[in-house]
Image (spheres, coloured by chain):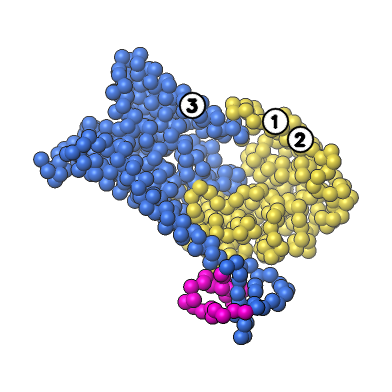
Amino acid sequence: MSFIDLLSLDFMQRALVAALLTGLAAPAIGTFIVQRRLALLGDGIGHVAVTGVALGLLTGASPTWSAIVVAVLGAVLMEVIRERGHTNGDVALALLFYGGLAGGVLITGIAGQGAATLQAYLFGSLNSISFADVVFTAILAAVVLVLTLGLSPQLFAVASDQDFARVAGLRVRGYNLLIAVLAAVSITVAMRTVGLLLVSALMVVPVATSQQLARSFRATFVGAMLVGCVASVGGLLLSAALSFRVDVAPGPTIVLMALAMFTATWPIGVWLRRRSRLMAPFPEVSAAPHRSTDQHPHEHGKDCGHPAVPHADHVDYVHDGHRHAPHGEHYDEH
Amino acid sequence: MTSPDTSVPVVLDRVSVAIGGRPILRDVDLTVHAGDMVTLLGPNGSGKSTLVRALTGLLPVARGEVRLFGTPLDDFGDWQRIGFVPQRSTATGGVPATVREVVASGRVGRRRLLRPTSAADRSAVESALEVVGLSDRASHGVSQLSGGQQQRVLIARALAGEPDLLVLDEPTAGVDLPNQQALADALRQLKERGATIVLVAHEIGPMMPLIDRTVVMRDGWVAYDGPPLTQEVASHTHHHHDHDVPGGHDHAPHVSSPFDWERGNPG
């Protein structure tokens, strides 16, 4: 069987659709979570959702549904603690993380299920996805996308400055809860794809990748969704191609693919930021004393290789810790 | 009983505010008339910011009443008439954003849900950028700007909502003189349009000629309310110096345990 034959299989097509939807939805809500500097919120909800899955296994209910219910409850609880608990919200969140994971493992044991059952949820099981799962994923992903895109002005305002948003008349608590609930929903969406323990990666890594190159929020948002799609579809295809030789799980491949994209863009981002810092105009300062350089054999010009930084009505050439401005025959120290 | 006058932007009627059960503001009376620019001065911990947070509804009032444009705060719904510049908040978040995007978020109080940006939104954003003199930086990343310029971005964000009352909490803290001048120019233009301005400040500098009235806070009380005072006079009359005052104290309790919170404090 060749790689192309593999793509024509039903389960593979279902997995591709699920991966694509996850790659769109998780970074969309992830952008607002990173904007709020809560990058690890997704991780916390993912851990809490483990308990939800275990409760499903114990009661015989659908683990996806019980995971959604528990994840949403966990997200709301975290949001309430974060909002009310003042400074050390992170400690409270950590308590929930561990409680969620420990509870999940414990309950799974009580339910008489082994670690293998839980593993499908912890690290994803794209290849066992059913048609009903795909429909379910599509509906949830659509809800996440419609709400994040439609309410993006409000979510942006709330995520960047809560006090300002509240005085502007927004129901800040409602929007915070919405972000938390949407995060919980995307996590359950991504549960089948990359698994609960890696889910936060799809919310955060595409955003981190995208912001290496983007300067605006909109570009970061769109870029993150693009990176998310490429990583999840690409990761799935890569793991399928490799599966002829070794046993490669799609979940970790997707996450590593996203990280590889981050690693590739990071040096470019470093270079771009350094350049924009170097080229930022110097502020105008009145009545600076006139100082000319001693000796200056080098002639500055357009392509002399030294950064030409705007300074009031002229440019300063920057080299070796000096700022040299042309002044008649010589250069001034600025 | 007098009927509340809807033309008066701010009325504080014997307002007390407590944080964590500790009284911070005690029996503060303050009326700000339309078109006035009022500065709140006072040492650290005197309750200036608490007053501003109480009048913007960010802190609950323990006793007394705050009325904005004649409406008690609890019933007040015209939040788009209020512009707010919070204290020491940076304009940058976890994700890069351009100056125009941050300023455009100031329109959020006037936008309806799930509607695209209107022409009125765009022109308000452009004119707010112009007022603070950052039009040429509109597509720059906010994090590329200096602290003073970021402060101007936050003021433009408040202006983009076209407020009738602008409340600024320490916009001049740590801002260099040219940027203070730019702030003062922006506030002058806003004042000429008839807006009311409440300004908490440590440094008044170039804003001095704009000020109609000074209120000096001390230890949660209004210690002076009258014609404009310079920073020097205000601090000499009431305190030797704003900073490192012996015996200077902060009434706000510090809650540090993760599950502790104050009943009745919406956080």
In the rendered image, is residue A96 in sight? yes
Quadrant hosting residue B245: top right
Residue drawn at 60 percent across, 74 percent down: A324
Span highlighted in magenta in the image: A295-319
Residue A53 pos. (x, y %): 35, 24
**Label 1 Cα neighbours within 10 Å, binned few <14 / some 14-19 / many ≥20:** some
**Residue matched to label 3:** A96
State left or right for residue A62 relative to residue B56.
left
**Residue matched to label 1:** B20
Chain B tint as drawn: yellow
Give the tally of numbered discs: 3
Chain A tint as drawn: blue
Tell me, yes or no, whether the two marked residues, 3 and 2, touch with CB atoms within 8 Å. no
**Residue matched to label 2:** B251
State left or right for residue A116 relative to residue A31.
left
- Callout 1 secondary element: loop
